[in-house]
Image: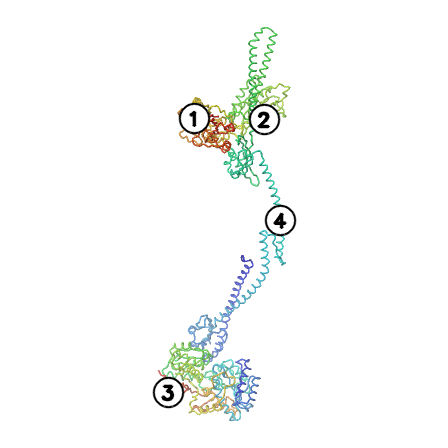
Amino acid sequence: MRSLSIFKKTGILAVVLFGVVALLTSALAAYMLHDRMVAEYVSKGTAIAQSIAGASQDILLNRDAATVQAMIDQYLEIEGVAYVFVRDADRIVVSHTFVPEMPARLATLAEPEDGVRVVGMTVESLGRVIDVGAPVLAGVAGYVHVGMSKELIMRYFWATVIRMQALLFVALLVCVGVLFVVTRRISRPLQQLTEYADRLASRDFTADIELTSRDEVGHLGRTMRAMARELARLFTDMESEVNKATGELREHMVYLSAIIDNLADGLLVVSPTGAVSVVNPAMREFFGLGDKDYSGFSAADVFPVEVSDLARAIRSCEGVIQSAEIPLAEGRIGMAVGSSIMVAAPVARCLGGVVLVRDVTREKALDQLKTDFISTVSHELRTPMTSILGFARLIGKKLDSAVLPALGDNPEARRVAVQVADNVDIIVTEARRLTDLINDVLDIAKMEAGKIVWHDRAVFMGDVMHQAADATRGLWSAKGIEVVIEMEDDLPPVRGDHSRLVQVLVNLISNAVKFAPRGPVTCRAHLDRADVLVSVADHGPGIPASAMDEIFDKFKQVGDTLTEKPSGTGLGLPICRQIVERHGGRIWVESEVGEGSVFFFTIPALVARAGTGDIDDACRAMLPEPDSAMLMRLPEERNLPPLILVVDDDPILGAYFTELFEGNGFRVMVAADGEQAVVMARDHMPSLITMDLMMPGMDGRTAIRCLRHNPFTRHIPVLVLSALSDTATPGCDLSLTKPVDDRRLVEVVRALLLRKDVRHSCLVLGDLDDVTVEGLTVFCPDDTTFCPPQRIWSHVERGFRGLVLIPAELAEGIDVDLLARVPGVTVIIMPARTGRGKTI
Amino acid sequence: MVARWAIRVLRGILLRGQGRRNMRRCYAMTPAGGRGIALLLLALCAVWGVGPARAEPLAGGAGSYVLGMSADFSGQSRGLGVELYRGSVAYFTQLNRNGGINGRPVVLVTLDDGYQPEPAIRNTIDLMRRGDVLCLYGYVGTPTVTRILPLLGGGAGTAKPLFFPFTGAQPQREPPHSRNVFNLRASYRQEVAGLVDRFVSLGRKRIAILYQADAYGRSGWDGVRRALAAHGLAMAGEATYRRGAGFDASMDEQVRILARSRPDAVIAVGTYAPSAAFIRDARDAGLDVPIANLSFVGSENMLDLLALLGRERGRDYTGDLVNSQVVPCYEDMSLPAVREYRRAMDAVNPGPPEGAGPCPAPSRYSFAGFEGYLNAVVMAQVLRVLDENPALGLVGAAESVREMDLGIDVPVSFGPDRRQGLDRVYFTTVEQGAFVPVGEARWEAWRQ
């Protein structure tokens, strides 16, 4: 048996309770009997004693002991009487019934003084007795004592207890028997039911139960059977539903999987911990990953640092969509966009991030083509235009200075000459207009291609407005229109390119002056929440609402350009939009026809940051992302000498360093503070940076951190030149304490530049035999790897940075140009055995 | 004889269902017995449960004197009852053979009470209600006799006196019951007083007593107490035994109790079986002081038991015994009564009453039998006086007996104030396996 069944427990409990009740009942009954019998014996003994006392008066007085004995002998036969004895008046025992002798305890018993006295005592050989003493004739004749046996009472007591117990035991046995039979009849179906339920619990729906009883148990069994059938049916239904759903799900999964696998873009999904979870074939192809399963690998172990940084930025769901241009395998360029995967329901949680990479190599190439085309066309147009303009002006001057005076008073000739001069003026005007047009087209093309260089720094909008007003003074003063500048006090600066912002305002003011018949033109600047809002209002004819959206498109001007003489290139506002939007602002117009127009644009205010707060944020503010244009690099000017960026707030020192380095054959740029240094480093990719630490604004340490944070600048060697004795600066390559020795400085710079070239290691294509090892140790002091030509890309993709030595014979089979563009990779094509090394 | 024994057995079987206490037994005192009479008696006994015992065939007439006797024929004292009966029957048989009392026979009706008071009372009531029973005669035992005394006054019918009960107890010798009872033997007080006086005179003053826990024992105890008080002495020790104890009962406890009191002599007030048991255990325990027994003990039966035991164990248990008697020794052939008694016993040799329990072979002679014989002699004399002068009534006739010579050197007299015929006590001891009177030399041997 597994354990005691409920019936057995109940049975045992019942038996125990029965036993307790039986015991108590019999004990109570026996106790009552005992009590009653004691009382009965006392009264019996009293009655006997008094009877003897009454009958024996004469006899005792006659001193006839034998008669007294005959009398008391009769009473001895009465049940319960243990003894009788009689004393005479002298208290001598004259008759007794003891055998073999009178117990000493009773022989010394005191006599009752008056009336009957009952004493309980224990007497040897008799046990416990109740002695009833009664005086005969008030003690004059003697005393009678009757002993009632208490032992007899106890015998009755125990006999009663035992009999009752026996009776109850028999009753209990009978009850247990009956209970057993009844319980068996109840428990067997229950047992069957339990087994049945157990089988059902283990999902054995084939089980069945035989039911014969018509009572509650039978009803329960039938209910269970019905339930089991229902369950079995439900299970079957559910199973088929699940199978169906699973099939659909699988199909759906296959479908989704196929979509992902067939995406032209590379797809990478990372978990919140940074582990790779999904990589599609396009992604594998982009990064040359092969067919290995990378699930669970850290993204940093599998992908280049640019991708893993992106993945790290997005996986924690901080809500930013990040994008970056990244190098792909085989010299291709990819555009990576990363976004977080957020699940809103049922509980908002982050599932990691997804990175999409698109191969933009072709777009880049097209872009380049366009840029090249525009540059070429512009150049080809500008050159003749310069000649046309120059010669036209020369003709005009010659006409004024030579022809007209020579004509004298010949009115006909003078008239013709004046006409010619007018025509020449027209040529000059149109040529100038064409030149502006070409410049604007070139500008906008550059902007759209992202090929423009932005000189971002803190800019005060007041300066910009005044400068723009000054620049357009010729226009509005000639037309007699006043330009009013209104500016809020304490207007914070904005971050931007000063001259470009001036260009925006010049455009707007020029337009206003151009179209407005009367003044004034009002320029306002004030802080609107986090932006600096600038407006230029005029009293011109206004712009119809239908045209408001178009005026910012290229080559759109209000009015009919066919019937009206165009008064501009039509590219001013598009350029403004390009510039404003590049600065993170927006531009729009509000106008009412006949009343005038107001042009608005906003630029985010630069909120001054305290000290070295959040470095990443500070850097990000300086390197606003996403903006692929910011990450664009100029084509490397390979044949130029190395560019050194000197960062120092002291202009004298800056001039000194400039002179020193230029004297040693380097190109030099100077940045006055950390921010400028970071921006210039990013834009010009210097070969080396000398960094002062103590500077206003962003200090040198922060600048170094920002440089190291940026994937495009982190490889640039930094030489710290500081007056601080404690120059232990994280991120720098070397540090010197001011004042520095000229020669030593130049040596260090050269060493750093050389080390930069061979910083990581050397990779030599081909076998040892193909390579002239002569002089190799100079470049590669410690780490040289030989690899077959076809493996070069996989090395680079795995993060190789350093010197790549390519024998000239193998150079034909490798896209050396693309290889050279990889940041941190320097390509050296080694001549054939008799040739000499050539640095590209 | 063979036929009579067979009938006895048959009757025993038939009557068994009635219970021992209520069994009534009858006995035809026919010396040889005829089959017809025996059958007739059997039929009568079976139908009425009781039958008169008749000395002679002619005694069945209305003129016979019928005496009712209830005694112990089956209990522990049955030896006494039987011997007493035999002694009386020996005399009455001879009397009836010689013509009875002026031609009227004397018939003895016997009932067994087993020495228990209750049957004795029932038997007495039966006898009192029977019209043909003239008087009660020859009862045995103190506890029985003391209980039936109130019946004698006529409470259960006509008043009928009791003649010569075999007990020395005091109640029937003193008012109020003494007027209905005539005693022949000396009282227990007289017996024990004689013993005590003798022992004290011999220097044995520490006297202990073993007595039966009933009225008989108490009578003896009372006598000893009074006798010792007369000498200014008290009992050295006392112990009881329960009535009904047999020879096989252990008396060790009683011996231990009495030995503790270091007695000079022990007086036993008991019947023969427990007395013999006491003597046995006392002697075994080393208590070798003289042990005295009263007349009621049944001396011959006690001696038989002790002699048998002595033979078995090879030890003499009969030494230093004193038995007081109320009749002379039946070995004293100098007395005419002894000679007549022995002659009558030899001539009649009566058997035990019918239904008597098994008992040792009836003694040829015995103190109880001699007493029964003497009782019968005196009774016959009373009946003669009554027959000659019926106006006296039975009590008057008895009271008129004066200075009657029984042949035992001591005359018998009754009167309105004298209800006891004899007063002398005789002392006997065992010598050569038989009771003999205690001689002076013997007494001196016990002096200390």
Give the residue pinned by disc 2: A588
Q: Nearer the viewer, mark 3 or mark 4?
A: 4
Looking at the picture, which amino acid does disc 4 mark? Answer: Leu
Q: Quadrant of the C terminus of chain B?
A: bottom left
Give the residue pinned by disc 1: A750
* Dot 2: element: strand
Horizontal relation, residue A476 to residue A611: left or right: right
Q: Earlier in the sequence, mark 4 or mark 1?
A: 4
Q: Nearer the viewer, mark 1 or mark 2?
A: 1
Q: Nearer the viewer, mark 1 or mark 3?
A: 1
| As drawn, A295 above or below A510 | below
Q: Residue furthest right?
A: A563
| Inter-mark Cα distance, 1 to 2 | 52 Å
* Dot 1: element: helix
**Chain ID for label 2?**
A
Give the residue pinned by disc 4: A234
Task: Give the class, few, some or many, for how many residues have Cα within 10 Å of label 1's Cα (few <14, many ≥20).
Answer: some
* Dot 4: element: helix
